[in-house]
Amino acid sequence: MSAPDTVKPENPYARTYADFLAQTREHVLVFLHDEDLYRHFRIQAPGTRMWSWDVTTWPGHLATSGDIADGYMFTREPDMIGFFTSAGRSEGYYSDGAPSIDFRYWAEKLCGGRSREVKQYNPDLFIQLVREHLEESEGLGTEAQEVHHQQLALLARLHELRGLDGDAQLALFEAHWTAQEHLAAAGTVLNHERRNAAAAARAALWSTDGIPDEKFDRLTEEHNWMELADIEVPRHSPAERRMEIIEDARWHADSESEAHKWLAEHEDTVGSDTWEWDLRDWDIHFLFTCYCIDLAVRLYREHAAAKTQQSAA
């Protein structure tokens, strides 16, 4: 059963499927041989072999060859047409109408242990995984960005109640950030002077001097003062820091080994389990092959159903 249209997910390979549809809209099934499990048929547009492919089956095997889907052989069950009819696939799952194919499962049925050959390093997947991890992280994620927005809104209102103009507000922020940076530069060395300077700058940033109690009470009712005032105010927002990290990752996305090296060197931001990340994605030729098999099986089944109806008539 397919999901309702309103909740159908997007096809991660929508562009590849759209290209496949555009090139195969006129394709028909042409039989060259059809005898029990020994079959040979061609899928092609009338009058041309461009974007055509052959499917050949014999007991326990299915092979593809042609202008596309060339050079693949699968083995699993005696009738591989029957296998590909339902195994690891469902119709109309994605919002673009593409079938949901379990490419991993189908790849496992390739002869000669070729399942890893049909995947290749994808730099876009590397960047996507880094982005997704950062967006979910506690300190740099989307929730942290929302808290940052709330914090800035609270400080803007606080400074407004104190009667500070834009330059005065900016000076408080700059003093706070500079003191924090000086403190961080000291590392693990105990530096009372820098620590005191950072504490003083933070206190000045969050000072409530001159604000009547009733206005301060209203301020704390409108904003989560206890939580927001207890969080460090960074010079760069979580979103800005995420983009800096992602841009740095792009400079190391040329190869799979370089990408894994970058991940290992940035465990503090992306975590220590990135060695498990699979940065390889399905080769476009294998994706086309799977779509070719899907279409071939559907056309073959439609032909068989029509033939059965004719015999029954």
Image (cartoon, rainbow, N blue to C red):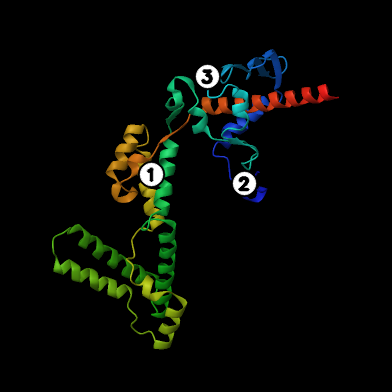
Secondary structure at numbered mark 2: loop
Q: What percent of the width, then of the height, locates residue 23?
A: 65, 25
Say few, some or many: other residues with alpha carbon within 10 Å of mark 2 (under 14 / 14 to 19 / 20 or more). some
**192 sits to left or right of 167:** left
- CA gap between label 1 and label 3 equals 41 Å
Residue 308 x %, y %:
78, 24
Residue lying furthest top: 32
Amino acid type assigned to the residue bearing label 1 in the image: Glu
Question: Element under label 3?
Answer: strand
Occupied quadrant, residue 35: top right
Query: Which label's residue is closer to the chain start, 2 or 1?
Result: 2
- The amino acid at mark 3 is Met
Note whether 22 is above or below 55 in the view shown: below
Three-letter amino acid code at disc 2?
Answer: Lys
Residue under label 3, please give it.
Answer: 73
First in residue order: circle 1 vs circle 3: 3
Quadrant where the N terminus is found in the figure = top right
Q: Position of residue 153 (x, y in %)?
A: 44, 70
Check the image and report above or below for 197 versus 50. Answer: below
Residue 123: which quarter of the image? top left
Distance from disc 2 to disc 3, alpha carbons, whole Å, reads 32 Å
Residue 93 position within the rendered picture, expressed as x and y whole percent measured from the top left: 62, 41
Q: Which residue is mark 1?
A: 247
Q: Which residue is mark 2?
A: 8
Instruction: Name the residue located 68 percent from the left edge and 28 percent from the top edge.
Output: 298
Image: 215 above or below 250: below
Is there a contact, CB below 8 Å, between mark 2 and mark 3?
no
